[in-house]
Image: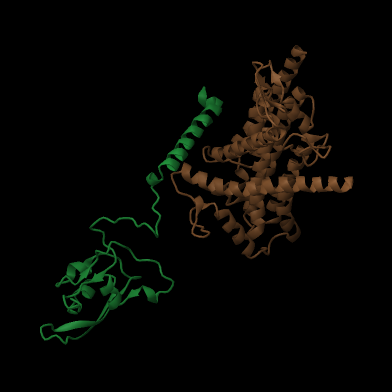
Chain colours: A brown, B green
Amino acid sequence: MSGLFDLAVAVARIAIMLIFCLTFVVVLTWAERKGAAYMQDRRGPNRAKILGLTLGGIFHPLADAIKFLFKEDFIPDHVHRLFYQMAPMFALAPALMTIAVIPFGPPVTIAGKTIPLQIADLNVGILYVFAMSGLTVYGVILAGWASNSKYPLLGGLRSSAQMISYEVSLGLSIIGVVMVFRSVKLSQIVASQGDLLWGIVPQWGVVVQPLGFILFLVALYAEANRTPFDLPEGESEIVAGFHTEYGSFKFSMFMMAEYFHLVVGSLLVATLFFGGWQFPYLASSGFVLPGGFSIGLPGAVVLLLRIGALFAKVVFFAWLFIWVRWTIPRFRYDQVMRLGWKVMLPLSLLNIFATGIALLLVA
Amino acid sequence: MGETLYLLEIVKGLGVTMGHLLRNIVRQENIPTIEYPEVRRVMPPRFRGLHRLMKRPDGSPRCVACFCCSTACPAVCITIVAGESPDPKVEKYPVRFDIDMLRCIFCGLCVEACPCDAIRMDTGWFTPPENTREKLIYTIDMLLEK
């Protein structure tokens, strides 16, 4: 009986998290098109209609999905058939797997059992995230190589060089957070961020690691292949980069992987640097303000506020991805490499050093 | 200093794009895009658009099939077949009057050449797309309707 209950809980958590993220991906594709349009003084998608309603083009992702599903699944003659078909899966699957360790709420107690609102509370937490996100580069390289044509190969090469360079800074920028919160378990990192610093400021990652946050954000954009680091698919130079030779649902899988990275990236920034599900000054009994003030709230309201807080943070960071994309032009390739190795890497090492000294002095 | 740090400039740029976004959401009517099939661009009054043939008060074509327009046409897109008019006051009338819109260069010389003001190019619209070539050869009935 207890085994069945655990299984049901596990399945429910996976289902909720996956459905949330996939729905979010769908909405993001719409938000990207519509946001881009308004930023560029255009109207954006507004034609797809259901029952005469357009609702600002919200049905366009649905129309896109139907279009992709009904297109011919074409495989060009010159490609390596096995790798060509593997590549979209390799792009999408690691992105899907990354969400497993992200806590989307505090542990809840149901029928005397404490259930962490997290698919798997691994003790290697962050390391698992990096292991998985490191795999995504295979999807891109495989696509570039298997396509057996010029531009995809260039796109694949660019992306492998870029992702490997920025993975270093990405990993190093996290070390500071791990040092401050003394854990690589994401649930523990989020729980530590509920404390107050000097009794006033919430001890969020961004407060204790401001430089680490900026470095992480920049490296994350490079890892997710988003503008200004979207060289692997630089349209003006190499057609569509690694997915030039892909069509129909395979292309759609690359698209989904890109947006899924965006969602996972936003979840990670929120979790590591903005307190995850922590609502400022909200303890499990209700609001506790610095002046000794407190407002009691029922447990369910606190839970909803906390999940809502994570949701709001994720929406903001996902929007920031889109916002930045339509603001900054793409870097030149040598600029990307220079930024990665000559600016990001020394700064992230400096950040670790400074954090170490600060921790020594505090202790 | 601001440009070397780069991040400050990015924040300024974010402000610019967000300004555009908010302005366009609040004042949708100021977006320059014309939503084509529902809304049409207003052409200037002297725009040379699709041709139309004028009618007499009794509804018959004003054209007397004098061939001035087809002679003047540098693109040779007007085909006229003349017939004897049933009206004793009018000598001829066009049995066929076809304009091949695929050949027409919209120069307006036919309008200049017409002695009876029977052809005009004041419809204010250009050739719409069609899926066959035949549909773009406008016959006399279509031209009289415009």
Q: Quadrant of residue B49?
A: bottom left
Give left or right: position of A189 versus A319: right
- Corner quadrant of residue B97: bottom left
Q: Residue at x 34, y 66 (%)?
A: B127
Comparing A98 with A232, the one in front is A98
Q: Nearer the viewer, residue A291 or A210?
A: A291
Closer to the camera in the image, A183 or B8: A183
Q: Residue A254: give x, y in percent of width and height.
A: 66, 51
Q: Compared with residue A333, is residue A241 higher up or lower down, i.e. above or below?
A: below
**Residue B78: percent from the left, percent from the top?**
27, 75
Q: Is residue A54 above or below residue A24?
A: below
Give the number of marks.
0
**Up-down relation of residue A363 to residue B34 (above or below):** above
Residues A229 and B60: in front is B60
Res. B98 in view: no
Left or right of residue B48, residue A261 in this image: right
Q: Position of residue A112 (x, y in %)?
A: 84, 37
Is residue B143 at all visible to an observer of this figure?
yes
Q: Is residue B100 above or below residue A8?
A: below
Q: Quadrant of the C terminus of chain B?
A: bottom left
Which percent across, then down, holds residue A354?
A: 71, 18
Residue A260, picture quadrant: top right
Residue at 65% in and 50% down: A256
Which residue appears farthest toward the left when viewing the image? B89
The answer to whether residue A263 is left or right of residue B131 is right
- For the point 68% across and 64% down, the residue is A77
